[in-house]
Structures are given as C-alpha cells and as structure tokens.
Image (cartoon, rainbow, N blue to C red):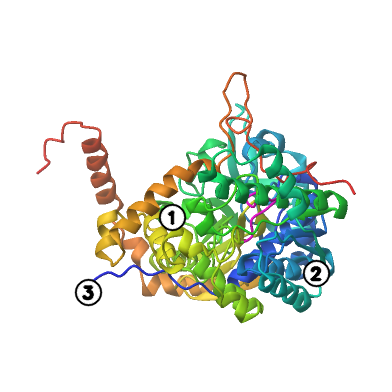
Amino acid sequence: MEYRVALAQVAPRLGDLDANRQLVADRLRSAATEGAELIVFPELALTGYLLQDLVPDVAMRADDDRLLSLSLEAPGALVAVGFVEETDAHRYTNSVVLLRDGEILGLHRKVYLPTYGLFDEGRFTRAGDRIRTVEVGEPLQRIGLSVCEDFWHPSVPMLQAQDGASLLVNVAAGPARASGSAAGLAAIGGWHRMQETYALLGTVAIAFCNRVGNEEGLTFWGGSRLLGPDGSTIAEAPLYEEALLVGVLQPDDLRMQRYNLPLLADERLELVRRELDRIIGERAGLPLPEDAE
Amino acid sequence: MTERAVLPEIDAAQTADLIVAFIRSQLEQTGFQRVVLGLSGGVDSATVAFLCARAAGAEQLLAVRMPYRTSSPESEADALRVVEALGCRTELVEITPMVEPMLGLIGPRDDVSLRLRRGNIMARQRMIVLYDRSASFGALVAGTSNKTEALLGYGTLYGDMAAAFAPIGDLYKSQLRDVALFLGVPPEIVAKPPSAELWPGQTDEDELGATYADLDRSLYALVDRRWTLARATAAGLDRDLLEWVARRVAVMEYKRQTPPVAKVSLRTPGIDHLYPRRRPGSRRES
C-alpha cells in the first residue's frame, strides 16, 4: 500500500492572512488532484515569518473557522499548516495544526524558539511545552509534528519516534546564507545530515517542508524533502523556488526496517530517565541519590 | 597545519540569483516597478546596475551619472559602457554647479578638514538628486555600498549610504568582483583601482592605507569568524592593520544604525514598536 505525501513549498506574504489562505487553498486543491493523503505547508504559512509586533494582528485560535475550513479543500486528506496561535489565556505561540475534514486531529506548539544570531523569535512568541504524537489511523498510525528549530534538538524527534510515530513532519522557515559560501553550506548541509540521521536512528520517515520567498533581507531556501525510514531521499524540491512536491511512502519499508534495525525497541528508556534525573538534579545542586557512585 | 586567514570564495551565480530575488521582492512588496541609482563607472554601482536590470528589466532602471569637476573622463566612459551593455535609461547631472556655491556659502574655515567636508557635500548632493529622481521617476533608490565600506564606515551618512535597500551590503569588495564578472560587468571596470574620486588621482586603497584584499581578510576574520587579534595574527594577518580595522569598525558603529531615541512614552519606534518595513498596508498605491 502506497501513501502519497505532498509538500507545498510556498512563499507566504508577510502579515497577509487573506492572501495566504487563498495560497494554501489553491495548493490544497492541486495536491488533492494529485491524490495526496497528507499535505504539508511550511512554518507560519498563514502569516509569514518576520512578524514582530504584527503577531497579535494575525493570531487566531486553533479552532478558528478560517483555519478549519481550509482543510475542506482537500476532502479526506490530512493537512498540516503553520500559523500563529492565540490560546484562551492569550498566549501567542508558533503552532502547526493537523486537520482533516474540518476537524483538529493534533496540534504542536514550537518548543524551541531560536533567539540568537539572526533569529529573534522568543521576543515575540512564547514556547510550547508538549512533545507528543498524533493518532491518524491506518496506515501511518501516528505522526510527530514539530516546527523548524525543534529539529535542532534531537530529543524532539527521538521522543516522537519512541512515542510511536512512523512519520515525523517538520515544518520550517529556514533563511539562507549565500549558497556556496561557508555559512550557506553549513546551514543546508546541517539540515540534510540531521534529517538523514534522525530517519536512520529513529527508523522513521521524515517530511520536511521549508518555505521560500523573501522577507526584509532574508531569503528562505526551500529544499523540502521526503525521507524514508532508512534515511534515503524519496523526493526533494528545488532550492528557492515554489514547488508542490509529491512523494510516495511505502509503509512496508518501515516494518522491515524496524525488523532489520530494532533500535527503537532496544532503547533503554528507564536507563535514559535515571541518568537524565541525575543530570537534572546535579545541575540544580540537589543531593545525589543514596546509590549514586 | 597552520591556520591561514582567507576570504572564502562565494558561488557567484547563486549569490546573484539570491540578490535578484531580493530586489524583486523589495519592489513587489513596496509597489514599485522602477529603480534609480547613481552610476559612477566603478565596480560597485556597475554591479548593482546589472543586478537591478536583471531583477526589474533594463527599461525600468534609471542610472544617473553625477560627475564633479574632479571626476575623471575615464569614469564617465566606463559608466556609459555599463549603460550601453544594459540598455537602461540614463541621465547626466553635473553636481559641480551645486557643490561650488554651497562651498562658497558655508565656506572653508579650516583647510584641514576641507577635503573631507567637500567629499561629504558631494555625496549628499548626489543623494538629493537621486531622491528627487526617486519621486519624479517613481523609483526606489538602490544602494551601492558594500560590506567593506559599511563595516569600515567608509561612506557618507545620508549621502552614498542613503538608499531604500542594499543589494551588495553583505558582500565584501573582493567577493563582489566575482559577482560582477559573472554578471558581465566589463572586466576593465572590475580590474581598475577603486576610487571615490574626491580629488584627482585618489584611490580607496591609498586613503585607507591597505589593499582591499587585506582589509577584507581582516574583516572576515574579526567580524564573520569572531577571531581574536592573536588568532588572526597567527593566521598571517598584520597586527597593526587588525587593530586599526577593529577600532574603525567600533568607531563607525553609529553609521550603521538609526539614531537612538530617548524613551519617554509607552511605545517607542525602534525600541518596542517593532514592525517589518514591508507588510500589508505599506505598499505604495499607484
């Protein structure tokens, strides 16, 4: 059984919800025509990235009809789309929601907000505090959602793989440094090595959807990719250009890969937790447990 | 193996693509179709002209040649070669009859700084012409400052540093020459010694006291790589030059930033009233 994934590598307009809703709706119709069962959009696809004080102007609740109704453009398909969420407590987060037929199946709030170098996200949005997976039914069973910088912290994909995800969906707004330059190669090369490693060690497929276009002085590089659970590239979108990339996952690949390479099952979670508890305690200056060496 | 200080090569084709996309996006987001720039005959403005012609189309580009009486005829000839190569619009505006009366009025009081003051007045007159054409031609002013100049503060505040956007502001002089050759800027323009032409025979490298190759390697080590002076010296750079560059980058910080605002109110532009320049509603209604 094949599973078709579409990655909509688009260039949203900064701060323009209406234009971006039309853009997303248009790509959803195209992807549905191509038989996609999961359609992924980049980080903050509905709002653009460098929002600064526009955040409250474009924020919406996760159950806002402007968001839910979008998924009706691709009946039966799973739709992952990034937006600025405002919670009931008026907490503003960089979120990605998973929808199907107007219903919310899952939601992830970006846990790691880069606030260093060229990034200033923690100045304008707040961090999420859950790393979970979403039940989606056959054949994928569970999906792990994350947003861009979350993937630079290996605990996020590894927790989601342990939590039963067969596919990790990372939505991104990755700014380019001049390609060909040392910094440019480091940025894109880092992403590639990381994705391949997570897929291999997590024995999990990966869908990475990165945006394109320009905001202020930033250029987003695209290069969206679909990887199999052995780290191989199934499909890859071009750099810098808009694209609707459709790739096919073979759920059987996951089954045999996990028989050949039973890393997830062999992981000693109690041992990891004990050592984590020890490290956390030591950092906080707490007394060591009795049996500590 | 001993570490050497080198400026990494850039991929000229991909860098040009990235900057062309940036220029298109600036035009699209502001609602402009046209670009105006000052064309001196040097490599920086020639490169920006080629980039803008690629991004907007040559017929949407106005290259204004603004010589002063000390400018060389060779520069004017080079500027015309760029215009001819691109097929863009062009215009000649002599700034001597603007600069001379001004110097006569606000006069030379102390001759020590006269050269500097005249250079600044020339740069600001050119800015006035470009912003006037920005209004009459309906165009954004493209900046022609490069990263070497920006970091060293080798430019006139509100003069040549004034622009709507800065296409080559993150390229060192040595790097943008590769981009220039890739774009088709005539090789003689790329090869000739850079000059601000504030007085006859002046060259940037004489005035700055170092070659662009050494300046760029020093800046790359100190700014991009954040090397210490000791590490950069060990990697083959000149200690005196490094110290001069580091001091100059620090002294010229003010030229790269908007002026500090005394915070008094609830929300202050630039401090806690922070918006992207281009957003819904910021587009020009034509």
Dot 3 falls on a residue whose secondary structure is loop
Asked if residue B278 is positioned above or below residue A142 in the image, the reply reads: above
Quarter of the rendering containing residue A152: bottom left
Q: Residues within 10 Å of mark 1 (few under 14, many from 20)?
A: some
The amino acid sitting under disc 1 is Trp
Q: Quadrant of the C terminus of chain A?
A: top left
Dot 1 falls on a residue whose secondary structure is helix
Given this view, does label 1 or label 2 mark the residue nearer the observer? 2
| Residue B1 image label | 3
Asked if residue B254 is positioned above or below residue A205 in the image, the reply reads: above
The single residue placed furthest to the right in the displayed view is B286
Dot 2 falls on a residue whose secondary structure is loop
Q: Which residue is labeled 1 in the image?
A: A152
Please report the bounds of the magenta region as a residue range: B160-167
Residue B31 location (% of width, % of height): 82, 52
Residue B264 location (% of width, % of height): 59, 18
| Residue B57 image label | 2
Quarter of the rendering containing residue A141: bottom right
Q: What is the distance, in whole Å, between disc 1 and disc 3 at their CAs?
A: 32 Å
Residue B199 location (% of width, % of height): 59, 59
